[in-house]
Amino acid sequence: MDYKDYYKILGVERSATPEDIKRAYRKLAMQYHPDRNPGDKAAEDKFKEINEAHEVLSDAQKRSRYDQLGADYSRWQQTGSPGNFNWEDWFTQTGFGRGGARTSTGRVEDIFGQADFSDFFNMIFGGLGSSGPRRAAQQRPSRVEAVARISLEEAYHGTARTLQVDSRRLEVKIPRGAQTGTKVRMAGAAVGGPNGQNADVYLKIEVAEDPRFERRGDDLYTEAAVDLYTAVLGGQVNVNTLGGSVVLTIPAGTQPGQTFRLAGRGMPKLRQPDQFGDLFVRAKVTLPKNLTAEQRGLFEKLRQSQVG
């Protein structure tokens, strides 16, 4: 299995700060997002690769584990040893086990729904690609926790994840409006709890960042490109929302950075899914770069009239 250089994928140094990583991710994710590259398989694959790199480097624990692997892998390359890197030895020497989702209160054997991640990722961080499922302890605590990472769009529409607990596969429905930290409880889903009672399983939600929107509670923030003429004279622009494209009316004299509120176009409220937050749209006024002689003349006349 080939080693994946997540730093190179995001175009950052190994000493990059979390802010550096976030900026690089947002820039690349915007560039390769499927909405901007419809039908482009290469862009789609690149987008998945960028998300995988961000998943690792934005998490302090995953990044630390990945950095240790990178150091060992580099030393192996420098020795000139023949053959492939010995993954089994690395896991043994570092004390890292493979597979499963671990928590301080128990564990679930495997979390599915991460098929977009590579075999390399699953080998290091996930249950896929492991040498076989591990058996849970005979006696579990009263609750078991696992983590599921979902996209902002999945949080908007609602989604599901499949967990394998012991020998059973359970489909867990994640409600609309879920936020990072939201927990979904499955009562008595894990056998072998204390006093012979089944343990509850809690699925803790992590919502991934979306390069198009910033989420603040139930409200969303985004930008819309507005050309100079529309900003000056007024007009309409299309704005992408998680519920589909809408038309925003731009009043004459709109200033760069001016923000417009689209009521009810934000995230659904977690316990009131029929109610929504708002979407705030910041006008990003774009200036023409190449003016014709006629256009330049008109702007000169406009400037003179303002001076006069």
Image (spheres, grey):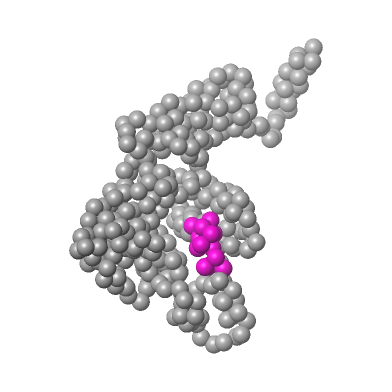
Q: Residue furthest top?
A: 308
The residue positioned 66% from the left and 31% from the top of the image is: 287
> What is the span of residues highlighted in magenta in the rendered image?
55-67
The spot of residue 234 in percent (x, y) is: 56, 20
Q: What secondary structure predominates along the stretch shown in magenta?
A: helix
The spot of residue 28 in percent (x, y) is: 56, 51
- 240 versus 193 height, above or below: above
The spot of residue 14 in percent (x, y) is: 63, 63
Q: Is residue 134 left or right of residue 281?
A: left
Would you say residue 82 is visible in this rendering? yes
Would you say residue 265 is visible in this rendering? no
Q: Nearer the viewer, residue 26 or 75?
A: 75
The spot of residue 16 in percent (x, y) is: 63, 58
Q: Is residue 26 left or right of residue 245?
A: right
**Residue 197 in magenta?**
no
Task: Give the mark count.
Answer: 0
**Residue 58 in magenta?**
yes
- 297 versus 284 height, above or below: above
The residue positioned 31% from the left and 66% from the top of the image is: 109
The residue positioned 45% from the left and 69% from the top of the image is: 124
Q: Nearer the viewer, residue 174 or 286?
A: 174
Q: Nearer the viewer, residue 162 or 4?
A: 162
The quadrant in which residue 192 appears is bottom left
